[in-house]
Amino acid sequence: MQGSVIAPSNDATVLLRRLEVEDFLFHEAELLDRWRLEQWLALFTADCRYVVPATDLPDGDPRVTLGLVDDDLTRLRGRVERLNSAKAYREFPWSRTRRLVTNVRVSGAADELRVTAAFAIYRYRKGDEQVLVGSYDYRLIATIEGLRIREKRSTLAAEALRPHGTVSIIL
Amino acid sequence: MAIAPIVPGLDEMIVDDRERGVFRVKRTAMTSDEVWALERDRIFDHCWLYVGHGSEIDQPGDYVRRQVAGRPLVLIRGRDGTVRVLYNSCTHRGARVCRQDAGNARSFQCFYHAWTFNTEGELVGVPDRDGYAEGVDLKALALRSVPRLASYRDFWFAAFDPDIEPLRDYLAGATEYIDLVVDQARDGMRILPGTHKYSCNANWKLMVENSVDGYHGAPLHHTYFAFLTSRGDDDGAKALRSDEARAYDLGNGHAVVDYPAPFPRAIARWHPIFGEEARDEIAEIRADLERRHGPERAYRMAETCRNLLIYPNLLLLDVAGLTIRSVWPVRPDYMELSGWALAPREEGPTRLQRRLEGFNLFLGPGGLATPDDIEALEACQEGFAATSEDYSDISRGMHRDAVTLDELQMRAFWREWQSNLLGAGHAAHDEGRRTQPVAG
């Protein structure tokens, strides 16, 4: 878990902003659960980063340490193209997923919001149930088209991808 | 030694017909509990097994915990500077004394009764010592060490068989390929922080095969190669089909596929995904390799790849990234996998980032390729439920000098495997043995 603990707020502006952010995160989760990956990709900025750190190095810097995923927009697009293909065998047919996103906290200035949240992703495939639990760290920016993701970091709480095996879906 | 269970038909589990060019492995090899028990007794208790890399324990007192063939071990550089592999089990009542995955220790104090061991394993503290009679030899109660420990180029191996042959002899022809990887670094290699810890619901031998299998590259990893092609590369999968793409039996169960790189390589093959700004630096790395090793060896390091199997369960994959992968059976139908990234110590942030981007794209449980390997192995294991009395076919290329798309490298593994299980020592390895290292 990165960063400092955010104090609770009774400021209506702050709370309203959280509602706006929550709505955005719920929208994002729905796009992923429905496999609307092109729409999901459009939520990212041109200079974006999507990162999943290694389970034994949750605070690792993906530029100089080994992580599970470190995508810029080009690689993220490649990931989406792959998952939309019938030749991404780990996800063809697609798994069924349901993402629960909660414990949303917002901080940062208006030009770049820092958002943390908790996730539990239930994934069903080949008769198996997998639960992927962890925390999100987002850097979001406000644009005329709404909030956009500059960075999404999905940190798994699990100590190892066992028995999950892989991270074949987008967290 | 425990009496090994008899596995009926073990000598018929492999069909090795040189005349017809047919090689088959009975699928019970991947499903049977008896075979798995025999593998523990006759392979994992009698082979050199990879524990860790020296760079993980650079400083005196540095340690990493490792589970090797089911045994909890600690790889540690003692305060005396000596590397040891200690059993992570208190000599008093057996509790694990080292309680963290990695760190730097002055000593290990067992939390149960507070017995204390120094970094050399010696018992240095026993509360209420007067409670023990003179006949209790506390000096003899040091943490136990593995019977044999040795390293090659800073790769540390342990063996549970005190009479095992020296590591260098065991590694046979694999040393040429380890050298070819390690010599890429000017200042030595190091393991980067961060581990891929994952698993697969399939027999461990399927991952060993898969890790040196060139034949599956194009069909299974279509989405990965499509990504590279769409970003301006030539047809990467084609490289696997070139005349240069070979496979060799390296002796003692070790094997390699050795082929022109179909992917970007941080050492030192430029690719459009690295960006124009990287061209000059990659050319400089290449020039440095040529200065240090001559053009022929530099070419091999930069432009070719190798998937090296070190029998029984270690892979050194010098591909889109450079990774050490260890494969540990837990049950016949479940294995645990660990992957580490190796990099030359001299690499700074720019080169490291380029290296890791190439690595992550292909390799590991979050990459564009490895998840499909896992899926394929699980699909095989699922299929075995219907066909475990059938044979898997591993005949490819038996009638010719093997190429990367052939299956000689798997036959090398299986011949050694069967010979070990039958208690016959090393196999003959008389097909496709690499005898003459490439000059340079």
Image (cartoon, grey):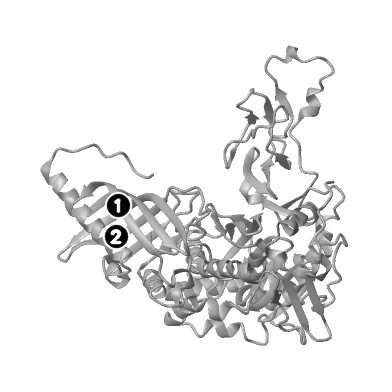
Q: Quadrant of residue B59?
A: top right
Instruction: Classify 10 Å Cα crowding around label 1: few (below 14), some (14-19), many (20 and above).
Output: some
Amino acid carrying label 2: it is Ala
Q: Is residue B183 visible?
A: no
Give the image location of residue B41, x and y in percent. 79, 52
Contact between labelled residues 1 and 2, with CB atoms less than 8 Å apart: yes
Give the image location of residue A143, x and y in percent. 18, 63
> In screen coordinates, is B352 left or right of A22?
right
- Do badges 2 and 1 share one subunit? yes
Q: Earlier in the sequence, mark 2 or mark 1?
A: 2
Residue at point 42%, 72% (across, down): A93
Q: Which mark is residue A29?
A: 2
- Give the residue pinned by disc 1: A101
> In screen coordinates, is B397 left or right of B3?
left
Question: In this picture, is A8 found above or below B337?
Answer: above
> In screen coordinates, is B249 left or right of B322?
right
Question: In this picture, is B84 found above or below B296?
Answer: above
